[in-house]
Each structure stands twice: as C-alpha cells, then as structure tokens.
Amino acid sequence: MGNYLDTLPDGWTIYLWLVAGGLIIAVSIYGIRWGSKNEQFDEDIKYLVFKESDKDKMSPEEYAKSREVLAKQEARRAEVLADQAAAVRKTKTT
C-alpha cells in the first residue's frame, strides 16, 4: 500500500480532503433536515425541564408558559403514539 501511495502524482491528497469535506457537509445537511422534520428545533424546549415544584422559583408568566408548553408537548406525544399504533395495526392487517 505504501508503494502505491508513492507512485501517485503530487497533489492527490487535496482530492481526498475535498471528498471528506463534501461528505461532512452532506451529512450535516442531512442531520439538520432530519432534525427539522422531527421537531428537534423547538425554542420552548427549555420549559420542559420544570416541574410543579419549581413554581416558586419562576415568575408567573414563565410558569404559565411552562405548563402551556408541557400540555402542547404531551398532546403532540399522544398524536405521535396514536399514529405509530395505527401504522402497526395497518401492517398487521396487510
């Protein structure tokens, strides 16, 4: 293998770096696209870490927002689980 690399003309490594860089960019774009389609970029996610016991540590507006975001997240989770259950039932009947 070392002998083969010595026979290559000068400057071949730049092509290797270009391919590696292209692959990194492609994987990054795919990851961002996947995250966007799967609701991973939610600015309100910070409110999901709070519990009922944190009410005294938050302003009333923040607490109300955290409860609203939690209710919305739980509703969305129920929708996703229902969709998954329907897909499983559909595959079992076919």
Image (cartoon, rainbow, N blue to C red):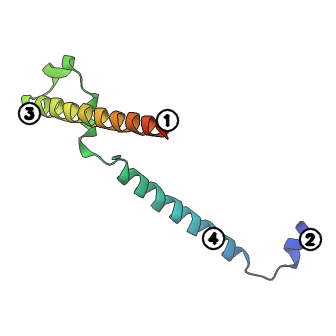
Can you identify the residue that label 1 sits on? 92
Q: Nearer the viewer, mark 2 or mark 3?
A: 3
Q: Residue at x 23, y 41 (%)?
A: 44
Q: Earlier in the sequence, mark 4 or mark 1?
A: 4
> In which image quadrant can residue 58 be found?
top left
Q: Secondary structure at mark 4?
A: helix
> In which image quadrant can residue 87 be found?
top left
Amino acid under disc 3? Glu
Q: Secondary structure at mark 1?
A: helix
User: What is the residue that sits farthest to the bottom in this orientation?
Assistant: 9
User: CA gap, disc 1 to disc 2?
Assistant: 57 Å
Q: Earlier in the sequence, mark 3 or mark 1?
A: 3
Q: Nearer the viewer, mark 4 or mark 1?
A: 1
Q: Residue at x 23, y 22 (%)?
A: 51
Residue 50: horizontal and vertical position, in percent? 24, 26
Q: Earlier in the sequence, mark 2 or mark 3?
A: 2
Q: Secondary structure at mark 3?
A: helix
Tag on residue 3?
Answer: 2
User: CA gap, disc 2 to disc 3?
Assistant: 70 Å
Can you identify the residue that label 3 sits on? 61
